[in-house]
Amino acid sequence: MTDHTTRRTFLGLAGSAAVLGAVPIVVVRPAEATPAMLSSAIRNIVGEANVRAGRVKLDIPPLVENGNTVPMTVSVTSPMTADDYVKSIHVFNEKNPQPNIGNFYLGPRAGRAQVSTRIRLADSQKVTAIARLSDDTFWSATADVVVTLAACTEGAI
Amino acid sequence: MPSALINVPAKARRGDVIEIKTLMSHIMETGYRHTASGAVVPRDIITNFTCRYNGTEIFRADFYPAISANPFITFFTTATESGKFEFEWTGDKGFSETASAAITVE
């Protein structure tokens, strides 16, 4: 704060920031993934198949402070036998610059259809996990995450 | 220097489902950040991860910039025989690292 800043201008700035609800953290941001990009990323994986809700469990904190490292676990209800298993798990997001997060390829030998990792989220948004089973049906789960410190695009280095 | 942390049980009974944890040190630069002068910091990420169990691929992953720095992956497999797990990470700028872990199955 400079010497020229008076108490009045400071309070004025603080007031306008409060009116906005929050001080914006992200100043420059490349175009975020649009719902169209998200659905085309999903179409790339599932093709014309129907994606049904269920069988997939997406464990992710509903409120995270730091979007740079968000723990996430995806598990799928499956017997994981030679003729009924999970082929792959795909994770997508709504508002990062890119809609894809990761693809994980399993097989009947996995024994348990569960994958954990840590992801980045650039904004409060929905995260979707889609599982492809051995009979080529697709199942999904979606979770809402509120992020207070955005990842990827914040600040210069 | 890149380095991997691997956690595989040293011993298991045949047929047990075991958990494998892996962490590879890597910046995972997204390609969406800028320097103070406005230049884009080029993308530098790990794009592929593979795990083989006695030569057979049991797990594979594709990474995007939305995977956090120092990618940490946990997955499962069924212990079938004694032998070796081999892990491989490849990515941008010719990144390629391997690690391995042994298991005794009784």
Image: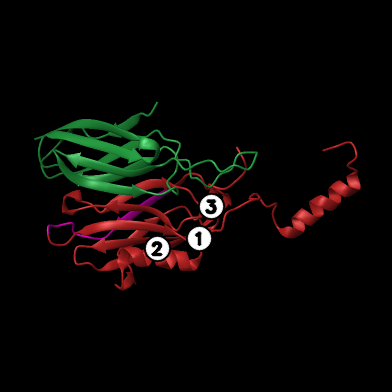
Q: Is A48 or B79 nearer to us in this picture? A: A48
| Distance between mark 2 and mark 1 Cα atoms | 10 Å
Circles 2 and 1 on the same subunit: yes
Instruction: Give the residue at mark 1.
Output: A33
Q: Residue at x 39, y 37 (%)?
A: B93
Disc 1 secondary structure class: loop
User: Magenta part of the protein: which range?
Assistant: A71-82
Three-letter amino acid code at the position of disc 3: Ala
Disc 3 secondary structure class: loop
Q: Residue at x 46, y 64 (%)?
A: A37
Q: Is residue A156 left or right of residue A91?
A: right
Q: Residue at x 44, y 61 (%)?
A: A143
Three-letter amino acid code at the position of disc 1: Ala
Three-letter amino acid code at the position of disc 2: Ala
Q: Indicate which label's residue lies in the foreground, 2 or 3.
A: 2
Q: Position of residue B70 (x, y in %)?
A: 41, 37
Instruction: Give the residue at mark 2.
Output: A41
Disc 2 secondary structure class: helix
Q: Position of residue A152 (x, y in %)?
A: 53, 47
What is the letter of the red chain?
A
User: Exactly how many numbered labels are in the figure?
Assistant: 3
- Residue B25 lies in the magenta-colored region: no
Q: Residue at x 42, y 68 (%)?
A: A39
Give residue A45's quadrant in the image.
Answer: bottom left
Asked if the residues shown at circle 2 and circle 1 are in contact, with their CB atoms under 8 angstroms apart, the answer is yes
What is the letter of the green chain?
B
- Residue A81 lies in the magenta-colored region: yes
Sequence-wise first label, 2 or 1: 1
Count neighbours of disc 3 (C-alpha within 10 A) and say few if under 14, some if 14 to 19, many if 20 or more: many
Instruction: Give the residue at mark 3.
Output: A122
Q: Chain of mark 3?
A: A
Give residue B10's quadrant in the image.
Answer: top left
